[in-house]
Image (cartoon, rainbow, N blue to C red):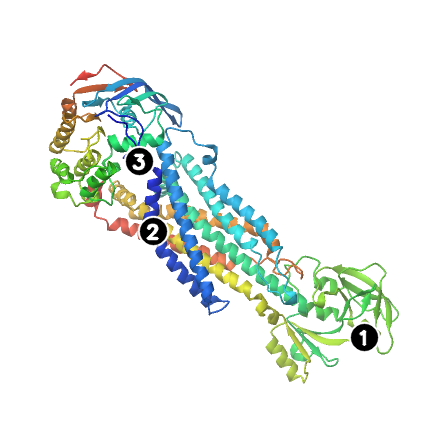
Amino acid sequence: MKPDRLIGVEVAGAPGVELRGIVRRYAGANGDVVALDGVDAVFPAGTFTVVAGPSGSGKTTLLRLVALLDRPVRGHVLLGGVDVTIVSPRERRLLRRRYVGYMFQQPGDNLLEYLSADEHVRLGHRLRAAEASTNTELLDVLGLTDRVSHRPAHLSGGEQQRLAFAFAAAGSPRLLVADEPTAALDHAAGARVVEALRALADRGVTVVASSHDPAVVAAAGSVIRIVHGRIAAEPEPS
Amino acid sequence: MLLAHGVGPIALGAKAILESVLPFGVGGVAGWFASSALVRAVGPSSLLSSRSQLEGVLFAAIAVAAGFGCIGVVASLRCRQRERASFVRPTTISRVPWELFVLAGAAVGAVVLSAASGGATSIGGGAVARVDPVVLVAPLLGFVAASAAAARLMMFVLRRARRGGDRLGNSSWLAWRRLTGIPGAAALLMAAVALPTAVGVYGATVNASVHRTLNDQNRMLIGADVVVDLPQREKVPAALKNRASLVLRRDHPTFGGDPFSVIGVDPAAFAKTAFWDGAMPAPSMPSLVRKLHDDGPGAPIEAVLSGSAANGSTLDMVDPKGDVHVSVNVIASATNLPGKQGGYPALFVDRAALERLSTAGTYQFWIHGDVTSALGALAAAGIAPTFVRTADSVTDGSYVQPVAYTFSFLNALVTLIGAVAGGALLLYLDARSRARRVGYVLARRMGLSRLAHLASIAIELGVAMLAGLAAGVAFSVGATALLSSRFSVDPQIPPHTVLSYPWRAAAIDAGVLLVVIVVATIAAQFASERTPAAEVLREA
């Protein structure tokens, strides 16, 4: 794979993600809070991995590191074999734009209130400099055909979550990171999202999601459990 | 979210600029038209030259471009900071509150303007009076910095006070929770009130003080409200009893070899009719003049000195009947005494003693009160003055008109800032609207009364806005204390600055603010009560 001219680093195919010795601390009112303490994890390329654990265990922090939204205090994050903890902020940003799709936990955090559903997907394609011809296809798969011209304020919570997924997945990212993708969805809508995540993984996209939903865990190829900022057990097949 | 999608800080800064194009463009055009209308209405002229209008367009363009620059830079920096917050330590300079830079700018501006202006222009010699620019520019920047610093302090206090308030009543507790829950919004509202209050009160103080000082200086120059020259000695008409006193003035004697004005007065009457402002520094003219008395022929003549002279100086006067050389006993002296015309120092003596020495000179009536009734009383008494001087004719002269324009423009600026503050209040109410509606529905179901909720809104708005009022008044008092020495447009003429506090204007401002708080409270309560509970609960 040729080095990306804009970014200057080489990322081969659908990149896998590897975390080595990750430590992440946050300054709190009563001293530092250790969110991740010496985490080693591998998310192989083209697989669907779920990160599971109780609330406050560090799942969101781990996902943000995988999605290059954060940087560890110690340790390394490798994306497709490239150590992204030592690249410049500009290169990291360009890597995110080209390769990474991210879904925040809160549906409202994923959407722009002034764009319609169709415009969100179109924006996602533009940001990744991808063809925009599959706008409605993605929305159709997620059951938003009748909502293409609606703005987020006119969508239900579940519809917003599905649109957020469509926005994150627009432009064919090679790594999709989703924080609780089915949290606000009913069974049927959640099943559509799970099916879409599975389909992406089948196409070779590396999918990493955090979830308590058994349906998501069941659809994943492997599960990583995290407790109190540490990996609880070896990845297990779901 | 856009950062997560790989959009960079510069692109987001450009996005912020593009979003501002329409409001800034409309604002720039509207501002240009408003400023042209203001100058036409207020002065100096209703005719605007094409060059001035073109320059106005240029400055509007510069202001709009500066606004774009600020928006773009701040947006980019904030996005960059957000993107890298986890990665890099904040630099030392990024931790410095930005208002300190504005304050530094105010101080630098004051120094630069002071050096450039060299103080106010003297009224004499055909020059035009103007307000010292330091008096206006430095405080405006200082008020911005002070308001921002007060907001930062308020946020600090509110964050730490969040845990408290458990002993408060329901309304107060609710209000305190709202204030401490989003301290930034409360602090912004406080600053939005503090800034126009500070500008308004300070502007009114400067305006009133400049005019009072100018008024006092003119009356000190003339000597009284009205001074008329008489063709000969006259008795004070009955209609002007207690309003006028007879004065004999000589402007060419020398005292100690230096040219002096000698003013012969009736000590009792003069103290009531000559001009004096109780705010001027002691000793007062009435207290000094009342000490004068005539010890009779041959005794040294007693005098109150306005100026300086060596001890034991002799008063020398030219008289058609023979030159006069007489010893003077200076019983008191002061810097500020009325009637010092021509810049010469003056000797105030008992008129009877002066008349005994020489009757050469000019008899005058020094009159307290308006000129129309004074001239009418003189005409009724058959007295025709040879010359009339009024202090108001000096004040109304064209060379002090720039002072009037300056403060008219300042009043317009205060109105504009007040409108912005009103906008800030509307934004505050709108931003909290959803939370307030949800809170109201839930609280009502838990037993909170409508009146208690209304009171909680009043307390919430009242605390923030009254804090702003207090802060604004404090800032204006501070600026006045620092700069009052520069309020005199002609420092060459005494008295120096005579402060006039705009109590009435400040009381009106406070009254208006209270009305705004009440109206905003009622409007917010009305909006909360009108909301269908089912809809709110569904959203929540």
Query: How would you rate the neighbour count of disc 1 (Cα within 10 Å): few for under 14, some for 14-19, many for 20 or more?
Result: few
Above or below B255: residue B110? above
Counting residues from the N terminus, which is met first, the one under dot 3 or under dot 2?
Answer: 3
Give amino acid for label 3: Leu
Of all chains, the one bearing label 1 is B
Can you tell which mark lies on residue B21? 2
Q: Which residue lies furthest to the front in this view?
A: A2
Can you tell which mark lies on residue B3? 3
Give amino acid for label 2: Val
Instruction: Give the Cα separation between the discs numbered 2 and 1.
Output: 79 Å
Residue contact at pointers 1 and 3, CB within 8 angstroms: no
Counting residues from the N terminus, which is met first, the one under dot 1 or under dot 3?
Answer: 3
**In the image: residue B322, left or right of residue B487:** right
Mark 2 lies on a secondary structure that is helix
> Does residue B180 appear in the picture of this structure?
no
On the same chain, marks 2 and 1? The answer is yes
Instruction: Give the Cα separation between the discs numbered 3 and 2.
Output: 23 Å
Mark 3 lies on a secondary structure that is loop
The N terminus of chain B appears in which quarter of the rendering? top left
* Residue B516 figure quarter: bottom left
Toward the viewer: B47 or B132?
Answer: B47
* Residue B231 figure quarter: bottom right
- Residue that numbered label 1 is attached to: B355
Give amino acid for label 1: Glu
